[in-house]
Image (cartoon, rainbow, N blue to C red):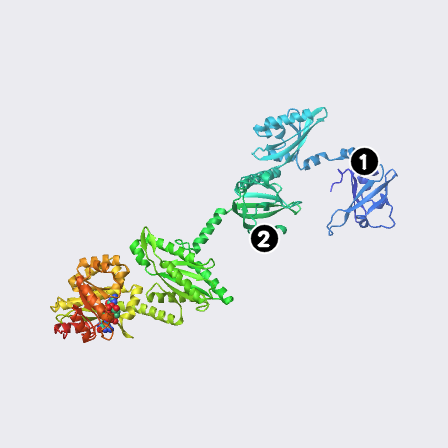
Amino acid sequence: MNLSPLPLAVFVVDATGSITSWNRACEKLAGYGAQDIRNRGLDTIIAFDDAAAVNRVADRVNADSTGELICADGRRVPVRVTVAPQSLDPDQPGTYSVIVVPRSGLAPTRYALIQDLPIADIIEELPCVFYVIDQSGHLLLWNHQLEDALEMTSDELPTYNVKNFFDEAVQAKIVQKILEAFEEGTSSHESDLIGRHGKRTPFLFHCARTNLGSLPVVFGTGLDITARKEAEHGLRVRERAMYSSVNAIVITCCEDADNVIEYVNPAFEQITGYTLAEVKGKNPRFMRVDDCDVDERQRIHDALARQQSVRAVLRNRRKNGEIFWNDLRIDPVASMEGKVTHFVGVISDVTEAKHYERRLQHLAHHDALTGLANRTLLQERLKSAIDSATARRKQGALAFLDLDNFKHINDTFGHEAGDAVLREIALRLRASMREEDTVARLGGDEFVLVIAEQPDLAQLGMLVERIRQGVSAPIVVDGKEIQPGTSIGVSLFPQDGRNVDQIMRAADAAMYHAKTLGRNNVQFYSDELNQVVHQHLLLEASLSRAIRNRELVLGYQPKVDLRTGRVVGAEALVRWQHPVDGIIPPDVFIPVAEQTGLIVPLGDWVIDEACRTLRALGALGIDDFVIAVNLSARQLRQRRFVNRLAETLARHGVAPGRLELEVTESQLMDHPEEAREALAQLKLLGVRLSIDDFGTGYSSLSHLQRFPVDCIKIDRSFLGGTGDLHNGHAVITRAIIALGHNLQLQVIAEGVETREQLTFLRDHDCDQMQGYYFSAALARDGLQDMLRRDTRLDM
Ligand SMILES: Nc1nc2c(ncn2[C@@H]2O[C@H](COP(=O)(O)O[C@H]3[C@@H](O)[C@H](n4cnc5c(=O)[nH]c(N)nc54)O[C@@H]3COP(=O)(O)O)[C@@H](O)[C@H]2O)c(=O)[nH]1
C-alpha cells in the first residue's frame, strides 16, 4: 500500500514494532526522512504514556493510545495513536498501520491537506465522468470514464467540440448550458452522451465555472443515470398500464388509516361508476351488498389482517345501485423496509361470466324444454331426500309418471304440439307440488316427482291421484283439444329402497304395473308387484325372441253361417309355443306385446301367416273363405300399415275381400275420428272390417254409422257364461242383432257354447256364430280337413 498521498501521518510497523513504511505527512510532522526512520523501533519514535504496561504492538490494536512523538529536532509533540492490523487474515504475518494525530493545534488545516491530495488519482477514480471545458467548447481535462462513454481514446477527445458528443437535436441546448455555466456560475442538465459506435448513455451533468490560471473554464461531473432512467421508464410503463388497464385497480393505504382508498384507475370508474374524488379516503367496503357473501368478506378481512394475498368472488354495488360480480384479487405492498403500507386490489367485473356460468349450471341440471330438473339434478335431490328421511326417521315418496299416449299425440298433432303438451304438464306438476319437492323430466314423456317427507300414506295417495287428474285434464293447443293421460308408479323411501337406484326402479316397476292395468291410474310399489313386473319384463325379452325364432303359431276358430250351417270363415288366434313353458295363451303375451310395441311385428306375422293359409285354401279350390285377424289399435295407427297390408296380400295372391280385420270396439272409441280415417283407407283397399267385442265399448250410434265396417261381433259376455239366455243379456243380444241389421251389417256371435245359445241366435236372425259349441281353434291342417269334408253345424 502506498501511504504517501495520504494527508494523515501514517506509518507501518511489523509485529516487532519495527518501522517498514513512512509517509510524507510523517516526514512533515516528525522531521525524519523515510530512509532515516526505516527499521527503527516504534518506541524510539513514540513515547507511549502506558509504555510500562503494553509491550507488544498487537496489544495496541483497537486501543486508543496517547504519548509523545519524538521529533528529529528533539521536540516532543503530544499525539493520539491508533494501531490497526493491515490484514484481517489471521494467516498473514502481522503488520500494523499506525496513525498519528497531534493532540493540540498541530493538526494540518483542511486546505493544507488538500495540497497533498492526489487529485489525478481522485479524478480517475470518481464514480462519474469528469471534464474541464474551455470557452471554445473543447476539453482540457477529463477522466477515463468519459473516454469509455464516448468510445474514444485520449488523443481523439480534445479534437472535438463537446456539443458533438450529443444528438444533433440537443446540441443547441448543450451549448446553451455550457454558456449558462460560464455566465451564471453553474448549470445542470440531463442528456445522453453518444459514443462513437452509437452507445447511448444518459447522464446528469453538473458544471461550474472556474479559472485555470487566467483561463476561464467550466468543469463538472456527469453521473450515469441509466439505472434511474430505466427504473423511471419501468415505473412510467407500469403507471400507464395501471391507468389503461381494463381491470379496475384500487390502491389502499393501511399505514395509519383503516385501509382507505388512495388511488383508483379509470377502469374502476367505468366498472363502479365512482370517480377517484368520490372514493378517495373511503374504505372499499362501502360498495358491499349487505348480508351478501358474508363468508367471502370474512375471508378477505382475515387475509388482510394477516397481510396476505387473497382472492375472492363476491357481489358489489355500483353507484347506480346495480349489483355486479367482482372477481377480486388483493395483494399487500411492502416498503423497502419490509413493512406493508398498502394493498393493491384488482377488480374484474365477471358479472357476465357469472351469469353465463349460472346459465350453464342451470342447463346442466335442468331440462331445456320444460325448465324442470333433469336426471342429474333429480338424482342429487333424491339422494339427499333419501338420506334426510333415513336420518330423521321420516318417509318420502317418489312418483314416476309416464304419459299414456304421448307418441300418439306427437304423431297426430305434430311435435310442436307435443312440446306444448309437455310444457303444460310441467307447469301443472310444478303448481301441484310444494317448493321443497322436486319435479323432474327424464326426457320424452317421463316425469318424476320427489315428494320430501310425506308421512301420511292416505294423504300421499290423494295427492298423487290429484296430480294424475290434473295431468289428465284436456290441453288446448292451437285451438285443438288434446287429452293427455298418465300412468303413475309410486315408491316410498326408505321403505322400498335405500338408494337412488332402488327407489327409482321401484317407482318405475309400479308405473309399469299401472300401464298393464289399463293406464291412467296410480300404483304403489310392493314386493308382489315387483315380481309381476319382473315376469312381465322377462316375458317381453323372450317374446321378441319368439317372434324371431318363429315360436308363434296360428289357431283358426271356424265361423259358421247360422242359416246354412256351413263353415264360411275362421278367426285366426295366435298362440305361443314356448320351448320350455309349452303353449302360452295370447291373454298373457298380447298385452305385453301391446305395451312394448312388439304387437306391430307380431301382427305383421299373423297377417302374413293368415294370408299363407288363405293361399293354401285357394290352392284346394276353397276361395270364398274369409279369415279374420285381430288388429291392435297400435297396428292401425301405423302410418304405412295399409301399404304393407296391400303388399302382403299381393305377395300371397290373396283377394283383399278374403281377409277380415277385427278391431275391438273400445280401441275404436279411444280415438274415433282417427279410427274412422284408418278404417276408410282399409275399406278402400277392399278388406273386410268387423267390430270385435261389440256392446262393451259404449259406441255412440253416430260413430257406429260412420265406421265403414262390414260386421259386428257380439261380445261373448252377452251370451251368458252358463248359456242362460233368459236374462237381461238376451235383451241386449237381440238389440245388437237388430241394430247391426238396421245398419246393414252382418252380425256374428262369439263364445257360443250351448245348444240353447245357438237356438236363440238362430231364432233371432244372427248371421254367424263361433264358439266351442261347434269348434275351438284348429291348427291349419285341422281347418283344411274340416273344409275339405264340408263339416257342417248340426242345426
Ligand atoms: N291383436 C291380436 N289379438 C289376438 C290375436 N290372437 C288372439 N288375440 C286376442 O287374445 C285374446 C285371447 O284369445 P284366445 O285366448 O285365443 O281366446 C279366443 C278364443 O279361444 C276364445 N273363445 C272362442 N270360443 C269360445 C267359447 O266358446 N268360450 C270361451 N270362453 N272362449 C272362447 O275367445 C277368444 C277370441 O276372442 P275375440 O278375439 O274377442 O274373438 C283375445 O282377446 C283375442 O282377440 C292376434 O293375433 N292379434
Q: Earlier in the sequence, mark 1 or mark 2?
A: 1
Residue visible at 40% across and 53% down?
A: 368
Along the viewing direction, whichever of 106 and 192 lies nearer the viewer:
192
The secondary element bearing badge 1 is classed as: loop
Q: Is residue 598 left or right of residue 370?
A: left
- Residue holding disc 2: 299
Q: Which label was assigned to residue 19?
A: none
Amino acid on which the number 1 mark rests in the picture: Pro
**Can you give x and y, in whole percent of width and height, for residue 377 in the image?**
44, 58
**Can you give x and y, in whole percent of width and height, for residue 450 in the image?**
44, 61
Q: Is mark 2 within 8 Å of ligand 1?
A: no
Along the viewing direction, whichever of 413 and 672 lies nearer the viewer:
672
Q: Quadrant of the C terminus?
A: bottom left
Q: Quadrant of residue 641?
A: bottom left
The secondary element bearing badge 2 is classed as: helix
How dense is the environment of label 2, judged by Cα within 10 Å: few (below 14), some, or many (20 and up)?
Answer: some
**Can you give x and y, in whole percent of width and height, for residue 29 in the image?**
82, 37
Q: Which label was assigned to residue 108?
A: 1
In the rendered picture of this protein, how many numbered marks are placed on residues?
A: 2
Q: Is residue 223 left or right of residue 747?
A: right
Along the viewing direction, whichever of 556 and 742 lies nearer the viewer:
742
